[in-house]
Image: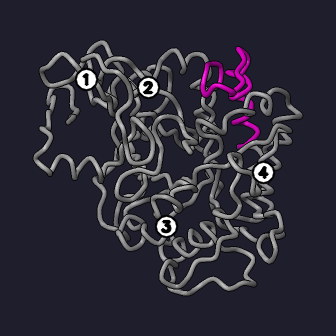
Amino acid sequence: MRRTMSGRLAVAACSLSLLTALAPAAAAQADGGHDRSYKRVGYFTQWGVYGRDFQVQDLETSGTAGKLTHINYAFGNISAEGRCFTGNVPGEADAWADYVRPLDAANSVDGVADSAEQPLAGNFNQLRELKAKHPGLKVLLSLGGWSWSTHFSDAALTPASRKALVQSCIDLYIKGNLPQDGARGGAGAAAGLFDGIDLDWEWPGSAGDTDTTYRPEDKKNFAALVKEFRTQLDAYARSRKRKQKYELTAFVPTAPAKIDAGFDVRRIMRDLDFVNLQGYDFHVSGEPVTAQQSALRARGDFSVAGTVEAWRHRGAPAEKLVMGMPFYGQGWTGVTGGGDGMGRPATGPAPATWAAGYEDYKALKKLADSGTYKVYRDRREGHAWL
């Protein structure tokens, strides 16, 4: 099931969408010596452990974990009552994947099988083990996503609703008070796992998924929600005498119209540690004409450079901008008109392994290497296609 805006399906050989920062610092080095002023953020998708069989352990064995500064765990959901929640509710929450599912020694980061009695198992326990191997690695809970932004607008509507939402998220993810599920869960079961919250509201003030509510006042309410998260996270850190503050980040759009409809940039950037810019899905396979989805530069079209400029122009400091990169491709079928296929009519999304119109990088690389398809590159605009 696709739970994120056209962009962060479990992707590539490592099921991660990679994000790289624009911070003015030296080039990244190997694990243990790289400059941490750069952010290298990867999304680990909850559901990737099923069909793709991509486990947290794969981040370790592939060497990916040592190259990241942050992992965003995608996603947490908000209930109709405006609270962070989890459970085993098809299409809404998956506690089994999060912290109930036992892993054997062969699939465990530390090589030890989960016991029936331990309170934390599943992805959460594996992420805890990964952090033990990489003390500088931070794990954030990414809240919302394309399919789970449904109740964000309602939850952010009033001071009381914002306070209640934030309290529930801190209780569930920061304090780690998970619902009991047999031996799993309980008070403090996941305490210390998450180092902060990533807000992935798609989108305040403009349309997102079909059942996602949005209002004109979302822009001011989102800014107020960011402030409420910052206030409560800081207060809890002080109460715990925590040396490092809990981080607060957000996923934000490329389209200027969406930025202006939902994001008071100067205001929110005061309280956010950084934002993850949408550097992909500039065009998607549901459109009737083929197009680029992540060009570095594109005159008269969405682009990476244009996204950065749009946020900087509105007051976002460069050192707080982290640019997203896709590890997957958009695909069309029934393309006519000849040439290299770019900018041509199509009949619909192309067949793919997991979802029509979206194919993982590792599958696309095999196609590119097979000789069956020709690789085209636009070096001026900075993108490639088959």
The answer to whether marks 1 and 2 mark residues whose Cβ atoms lie closer than 8 Å is no
Q: Earlier in the sequence, mark 4 or mark 3?
A: 3
Q: Amino acid at mark 2?
A: Arg
- Is 83 on the left-hand or right-hand side of 29? right
Mark 2 or 4: the one toward you: 4
Check disc 4 and report the residue beneath it: 85
- Please say if 69 is above or below 80: below
- Segment colored magenta: 204-229
Residue that label 2 marks: 312
Depth check, front residue: 35 or 101: 101
Q: How many marks?
A: 4
Q: Determine whether label 2 and label 3 are within 8 Å by CB.
A: no
In the picture of the structure, the residue carrying the numbered disc 3 is: 55
Badge 1: few (under 14), some or many (20 or more) residues near its Cα, within 10 Å? some
Which residue is the site of mark 1? Answer: 335
Earlier residue among tags 4 and 1 = 4
Quadrant of the image containing the N terminus: top right
Three-letter amino acid code at disc 1?
Answer: Val
> Callout 4: 10 Å neighbours few (<14), some, many (20+)?
many
Circle 3 crowding by C-alpha within 10 Å: few under 14, some 14–19, many from 20: many
